[in-house]
Amino acid sequence: MDHNQLDFLASNCVAGQTLLGMVARANAIIAEMMKLSEHIPPVFQGGAELQKFEKIIFDFKYMSQAEVCEGIIENSTDLLNLDHDFREAHFDILHRFYLLYESIWKYTQDLVRYYNEIEEGIYIEITLDMVLASADGKQLVSESIFLLGVMLILLDVRIAGPTRERMLISYLRYKGPHNAPHIDEVCDLLRSTPYNPSVRGSKGTAKGDEKRKGASVPDLPPFVGIFPPGYPASVFKRTNFPEYVIKMVIGRLRSDDIYNQLSAYPLPEHRSTALAQQSAMLYVILYFHPETMRKNHSMMREIVDKHFPDNWVVSYYLGNTVDLSMDWQNYPAAYKALGNTVSIENVTDVFEERWRKVDPLLEKLTNLLLEGILNPEFVLENSYKLLNFTREINVSLRWLILHVHTTNKKLRAIIAQGYNPGKLLLLLLKASQFEYLSKTIFRKLLDGKEKSWTDCKTQTVERMSELSDYFSGEKALTRVKRNENLQKWFKTIASKVEALDYTDSTAAGRKIQQLMKALEEVKEFHQIESSIQVKEFLSGASDFLSQMVRIANIKEQFLVTMSLVSDFSYGWQIVESFQDVIHKRIQKDPGSMLLLRPLFLKMSSILETPLVRIGQCNSKDLESVSIYYSRCLVRYARKVLEIVPQNIFDQIYEINKIHVKSFQELPTKVEKEKIRDYAQFDDRYMLSKITYAVSVFTEGMLAMESTLIGVVQVDPKQLLEDGIRKKLVEVLSKTMHESLVFNLKKPSMQDFETRLKELSFRLDGLLRSFEYVQDYSGIYGLKIWQEEFTRIVNYYVEQECNSFLKKRKYDWESEYQNEAIPIPDLPPVPGSKAVNFIGRLGHQILMNTDPFKTVYLDTMSAWYDTKSGKELIGMRTFTLLMNSINVSGCAGIDQWLCFRIVQELQKLLEQLKGMEKDSGPALREFVQLLMPTTGIPSNAAKLYAASCGNKRIAAYWPVLMTTLCHVGQMQLLRRQIATTLDFSCRLDSNVLCSTLDNLNKALMKDVKDHYLNPDEKPYPDEDVVAALSSFLVTTGKCEPLHTIYTTSPPIENISCILFLFVVSQNNCFSYDKKLSIAVFKSRKAQVDFTAFVVGIITFLKQLHTKYTQQFLAYIGQYIRSFVNVSNKAKQADFSQANEVVSMVLFLEYYAKYADMPRKQLEEYAPQFILDTGVIRG
């Protein structure tokens, strides 16, 4: 097969399509790596997070001592539980990271196998020489090796070696070696390297010195580092890549222009820029054969002379840069070859030359960007000059932007002396604007090329035809002598013009030039020379022909070349260093925001690098990769433009100060003489001034047009709203975080209420100011406030409740978190067990309603201190909560209490299940003696006393008392919160309240009808039910005491255990007529009777209804037994028996809070007993 005939990307060329698919896969892997690196669980990254799990998270040392490590975990119940919970929480993300690591290993193996197969002749009639002789072939071969190198370097940059090792070992432990067959090979390839991305600029960096000298060079980008000796060659060596392939590729890269870029940069001084992409590939691939850089002086001299004659900072992949003057120090041949480039004299000369051009370029750009200059005619006439000018700008920009970030101390000091970031930014902004306008105008010219050509041709033909008719002498009023020769000649010219075709621009151009020359010559004829009208016609025709020449030269190649020379992928990471400069410029001149849209469009060139090959092979990864990089660009755009909402909020603070401190509310009635006092002219003037500033920033933002950045459409109005939302979220989160910090050493209700009042005051002032500016910033202030406040509270509730879950929900997995409007991750307060302010607030409420220190009075809906008798938590407190944290905050506290109740109940069930074995025989014997429950056991008093005093059975009492009282306490709090929310809903939105009530009744009827007749009556739509449930909980239309929180495994004789628990504790309570509640008899200890009863109700609600029936049957039997004892003792008034009184009192409270009808109680205890002298709640 002839080399020249090899179409490497033909559909029938298996070798070409295979390699194309692999290169596309490599680009997709890198995108996935960059995406996942933003979501590494902190626990794997070391630091404080790792300390908690250090006994179950290992690095590769685990391989040699696996049995010892596993033995330590297995011998500790706590470590086993911790390990199980950790697996549940992290396995999914570990699996996704492992798939990434395995895909890197598979790509390496597949690529090495591919070149071995080519060498072995598997691909018939195709050799590596033939592939490298093909234009597409040498590009793909170079890219495949280059991307492998980039993949391994970026893996170290993005995911540190120790982090990878911890993740791989955790995955191995949880998945098992048999289910991960390639784990050993993956670990061998991706084990830790000497490179540490957190150490940047440690060697030869002038960072500290420049700060002392006041240098203005920006800080290094996040991913610029000095590679340690032998890196990344030592990592590349793990791939066992064929050496002969590397040598052949290096040969091609050093000698050929594989991307034909030199045609876009014809000037010799632009060669290094033209070959920049190829140079980056060569830089990476050289590390696959480091001996070349160490010993091959002649080859390195050739490479440097061609690729690095005036540049030493290389952007090797999408803005990730490296400084050759530092990186090649350990490679003698390479460093020596680079000596001339990085000499002080050469660097000084090159920098001065580049910087000297900035002012003239800025001046020319300013002139070109004047309104009316860049029009279609100007672009059409000067397209070649404009292209040259664009080329000159971008060459200067590229060199300056890259080299101001050199890590070499001496060279950076030279550049720092004359560098001005503001001027360079202005050049970048204006260049972007110029390129955008030029491309837009030329694109319109290209789209209208056919129409323009046709119009000009028609005008020319018509003029020639009119002149032909004119010289026929037959036209009225012409008074011209007939001239058949001129008549025929103009007809011939008209036919030739009609035959012109712009598709062949070269031939058309030559013909038009001949026609124009002929028209000039014909003007010399006497008959034409003497006629001004004819000469005017001929001049017009010549102009149209000249225009046709320009139109014929409108080609797609202009836009292609313009895109090539304006490529900005090299500055993706670095441009973030200009963010502060951009912010200062916008603050000074809000109108400069109009220059940012072209900059964002210029940055969109980063999409071309990874997407070209993915698009060529029609890979399914095209959409996901496009969206990822587009979102990165949009994220940067948001960062740049966030200065606008930041400034708006600065003005809101000023407005808030005026409203709070200066403004006096105008009373309903005021004396005429005092009206002037309320005018407050100075304050209103300041308010107007601030309002104008807000409107100016908003106007500048909204002046930007809607822009397609990558594949994401960006609307400036939406960006403004998102920016305001983001700042609002920051302010609200910070305000609640700072306000809800309580005194943990000396907690008091006064401190608690003061904090809530302070929060209410701050939020109210902020809300009024926010609503004030909404009309001047074009947003719906109150709507945004309510949406974001609710989202913030829900997010922090979710994060607080993570501690109750085995599988933790990560920040990026939260439905309430938003990439564009992130909710900040606030640090916990030292000394507090809570994660955030929701937990701190909840703990304070629980502390002040402790069932062992307070008593709940249902008639007052409040908790009172048992010692002082003061009200601690009541309606006043919940009103404060509503005023401070609003409806969503109260609903959030309610949800947090739900999680705590679930945790308490699950813990209790586990403890009861564990104690079942010890108490089982005694309980079974006791139950046998009670059977049947409709009868009365013999020696009842002794039987009950003996069973309650049994040590094995009595072991339940402390566990049940503590847990059930706390559960009852939280249930009462939930009940009070529901009442507050329901009242607020009825007061503020009665229509919504009524709608929810009616919809709830209708759905409940549908559910009942369904279960009565499932064949004909369908179950209501689940989405509607779920949505309604959310509304009902938020508006307090739920009954906490009827809620099922968890499911329970069967526990033998659980009804009997609860019954004996009530019997053992019930006699400790007595009825207080003053408080109308049962209180603890002992003054030394106290238990809230209401919480005690509600806790038992809640626990029974989690069990099958038969256990409740059995429990009440035991109580009924108990009451009848002691009534029977009284009858035998001939006591007429059996209600005086303490056992009967206390148990009937318990039943009264049970029925009240469980909403149990009295008739149901009468099934277990006779009516005359329930009616005898017992005070019912």
Image: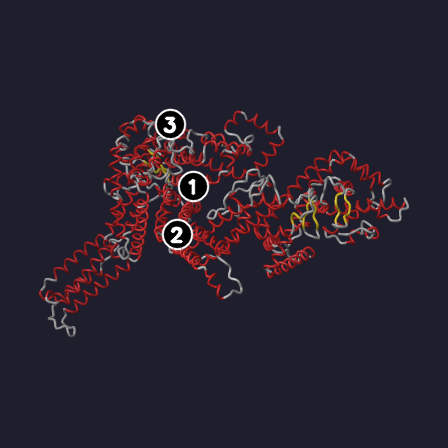
In whole angstroms, how far apart are the C-alphas of marks 2 and 1?
Answer: 20 Å
Viewer-nearest residue: 321 or 407: 407
Dot placed on the residue nearer the N-terminal end, 1 or 3: 1
Viewer-nearest residue: 619 or 355: 355
* SS category of the residue bearing label 2: strand
Q: Categorize mark 2 by other alpha carbons within 10 Å: few (<14), some (14-19), many (20+).
A: some
* SS category of the residue bearing label 3: loop
Q: Which mark is residue 594?
A: none
Mark 3: amino acid? Pro
Which residue lies under the disc numbered 2? 708
Which residue lies under the disc numbered 3? 229
For discs 2 and 1, the disc positioned in front in the rendered view: 2
- Seen in the picture, residue 333 relative to 1144 is either above or below; the reply is above
Dot placed on the residue nearer the N-terminal end, 3 or 2: 3
- Seen in the picture, residue 665 relative to 249 is either above or below; the reply is below
For discs 3 and 2, the disc positioned in front in the rendered view: 3
* SS category of the residue bearing label 1: helix
> Which residue extends farthest bottom?
476
Dot placed on the residue nearer the N-terminal end, 2 or 1: 1
- Seen in the picture, residue 734 relative to 62 is either above or below; the reply is below
Residue 992 falls in image quadrant: bottom right
Mark 2: amino acid? Leu
Q: Position of residue 223 (x, y in %)?
A: 40, 37
In whole angstroms, how far apart are the C-alphas of marks 3 and 2?
Answer: 44 Å
Which residue lies under the disc numbered 1? 31
Q: Position of residue 947 (x, y in %)?
A: 80, 37
Q: Position of residue 967 (x, y in %)?
A: 67, 44
Mark 1: amino acid? Ala
- Judged left or right of residue 405, residue 1149 is right
